[in-house]
Image (tube, rainbow, N blue to C red):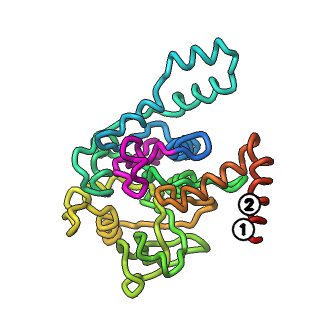
Amino acid sequence: MATVRKAIIPAAGLGTRFLPATKTVPKEMLTIVDAPIIFYVVEEAVQAGIEDIFLIQGRGKTAIEDFFDASYELEDRLEKDGKTYLLDRLLKIRSMANIISIRQKQPLGLGHAVLCGERVIGNEPFAVLLGDEIMLAQSGKPNATQHLVNLHKANQSTTVAVMNVPERDVSKYGIADLSAISEGYFKVKSFIEKPSIAQAPSRWAMPGRYVFSHDIFTFLKEAKQSLAGEIQLTDSMNELAKQKDVFASTFSAERFDAGDKLGYLKANVELALRNSELKDDFSKYLLELAQRIKG
């Protein structure tokens, strides 16, 4: 039975929603408390048993590679200063997994970004984690990617994460038409990318966690560009679902769209409240702030 050992993290976007900050800093390197967004994504993949992580990057994203590389001068200084708690965290970061960078030479969309990983994925199943989506697992539960990996082990088929969204948000996501198998577990009939409410077959949206069989590459290679000049991943997933079993599942995790300003701010607040050094003082500040706003 095929085991999911590899993951693709598309990270080639321009981050225009965060300009001017992202003019020189990749969106994925914006900080959530004290670590960049992409750290949390990679950490989730590693916890799911992923060994090889392929970053699909565009020009100007070398800061991401540098973050996961060794920093000998800094590590030496921390060791000499006895700051072992900081040193241990840096060593953990660069030993998390095999991080491999692949250049997406043209900005042709998410489907094209995934297709860029075909040669290194080969005939194996693989995970895809969007580089600006943070998912924090609930205590004692597998994280979103681990959950999909577990389901793939059982069904040996492409399986994607879904969540129910309000009608006002339907047009922001790829939406799935589903047939329930059990509570929170579905067989996929079809997918549609960012439909209007009138066009949407459901409110089951895909928040950016997938485990694919290698068959998806066949459809990505045949995909046509949209009117915006992009190869949509959802289109190829729809074609795959016509010929192969594709499943979908809910997940037990708090999800933050850190590629959106409000989602980014919420992620900072939530993770600050989970930080042992910050939570007491920060909680006190938030309560005081709430009183000021209320008053």
At label 1, which amino acid type do we have? Ile
What element does badge 1 sit on? helix
**Near-viewer residue (82 or 56):** 82
In the displayed structure, 140 sits above or below 242; it is above
Residue 284: horizontal and vertical position, in percent?
80, 53
Q: Is residue 119 above or below residue 85?
A: below
Q: Answer yes or no: is residue 49 visible.
A: no
Q: Which quadrant is home to the C terminus?
A: bottom right
Magenta span contains residue 52? no
Q: Which residue is mark 2?
A: 289
Per the rendering, the mark at residue 266 is none
The residue positioned farthest toward the bottom in the image shown:
198
Residue 85 picture location, percent across and down: 69, 26
Q: Is residue 62 above or below residue 153?
A: above
Residue 133 in picture, x, y percent from top left: 50, 55
**Residues under numbered marks 1 and 2 in contact, where contact means CB atoms less than 8 Å apart:** yes
Is label 2 in a helix, a strand or a loop?
Answer: helix
User: Which quadrant of the figure has residue 65?
Assistant: top left
Estimate how packed mark 1 is, as few (under 14), some (14 to 19) or many (20 or more) residues with alpha carbons within 10 Å: few
- In this view, the residue in front, 190 or 268, is 268
Image-quadrant location for residue 264: bottom right
Q: Which residues are magenta?
A: 1-30
Amino acid carrying mark 2 in the image: Leu
Circle 2 crowding by C-alpha within 10 Å: few under 14, some 14–19, many from 20: few
User: What residue occupies the far top of the structure in this picture?
Assistant: 80
Is 47 placed left or right of 56 in the picture?
right
Residue at x-position 44% and y-position 53%: 130
Q: Residue at x 47, y 62 (%)?
A: 160
Is 11 contained in the magenta span? Answer: yes
| Image quadrant in which you'd find residue 211 | bottom left
Can you identify the residue that label 1 sits on?
293
